Amino acid sequence: NAGVTQTPKFQVLKTGQSMTLQCAQDMNHNSMYWYRQDPGMGLRLIYYSASEGTTDKGEVPNGYNVSRLNKREFSLRLESAAPSQTSVYFCASSANRGRDLVQYFGAGTRLSVL
Amino acid sequence: DAKTTQPPSMDCAEGRAANLPCNHSTISGNEYVYWYRQIHSQGPQYIIHGLKNNETNEMASLIITEDRKSSTLILPHATLRDTAVYYCIVRVYRETSGSRLTFGEGTQLTVNP
C-alpha cells in the first residue's frame, strides 16, 4: 500500500538550475498539496490542487510552479533554484469527500541548493 | 482559521500517559481540531480529529473542552517511538479551498526510558 510517493528522495542543485519534484498518490484522492519545511520550523503550504484541473497558491508560492498532471500526480517545478529554496519538500493528498479532510503525507524530498 | 497555542516542549516517561495541551480560544463553531505528529525527518502523520465530542482511536484520545477553547491529546501509554513533534491545527472546510492546513511550530514530545 504505497500511499503518497515522492521522487527523488534527495537532490543537490546549483544556483540557477531547474528541476521537477514528482508526487503520486494511489488513494484516488481529489486534493493534493506541496509544503516546504525549513529547519526547526513547521510546514508551509506552497501550492495546492483542490481537484483535478485546478491549482492555487498557498502561503509561499514565489519561485515555484505546479502541474496537476492527472488525478494521481502533482508535480512541483523550480525554474531557477536559489539557496533560499534549500528545504525539505512534502507532498500530501486528501480525499475531500464530504468532511473528510485528513491529509496523508509522503516521505519528503530533501533539496540542497548550492 | 483559528490560531493555536502549544507548549514548545514536553517530557514523558515511557509507559505513562502523555497529555499534550492546545489552546484555540478563537475557534468558531464549524472549525475542527486536528492533531498530526512528525517523527524526525519523516512526513507528518495524522493522529485524530474532532469537532466537539471527545474522540478515541487506536493511536490516541482527543478531549475537547465544553467551550471548545482548548483540547488535549492523550497518548495513553507512551513509548519511545512516540517521540515526535505534535501539531494541533484548527481548520474549517471551505468548498473553494479544500482542506488547507496551517502548521505552527508544535510541541516536541520526548519520551524518556
Image (cartoon, coloured by chain):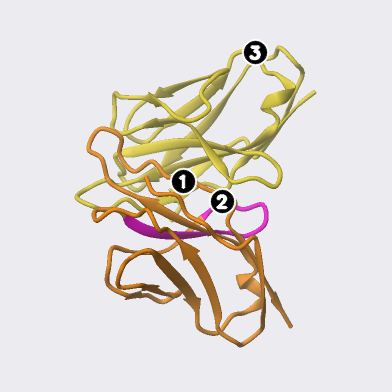
Q: Which chain is orange?
A: B
Residue B21: image location, x then y, percent: 51, 69
Label 1 is found on which chain of the structure?
A
Q: Are marks 2 and 1 in contact (CB under 8 Å)?
A: yes
Give the crowd class for mark 1: few <14, some 14-19, many >=20 residues within 10 Å.
many
Residue A65, given in percent of the width and then of the height, sits at: 49, 19
B24 and A75: which is toward the camera: B24
Give the magenta-colored segment's residue range: B32-44
Which residue type carries mark 2?
Gly
Q: Residue at x 52, y 31 (%)?
A: A22
Secondary structure under tag 3 reads: loop
Q: Which residue is mark 3?
A: A80
The residue where tag 1 is placed is A4
Q: CA distance from mark 2 to mark 1?
A: 10 Å
Please report contact status of discs 3 and 1: CB closer than 8 Å, yes or no. Answer: no
Colour that chain A carries in the picture: yellow
Q: Nearer the viewer, residue B16 or A106?
A: B16
Eyeballing the image, is B97 above or below A13?
A: below
The crowding category of the residue bearing disc 2, from other C-alpha atoms within 10 Å (few below 14, some 14 to 19, many at least 20), is many
Which residue is painted at 46% across and 62% down in the image? B23
- Chain letter behind tag 3: A
- Compute the Cα span from label 2 to label 3: 26 Å
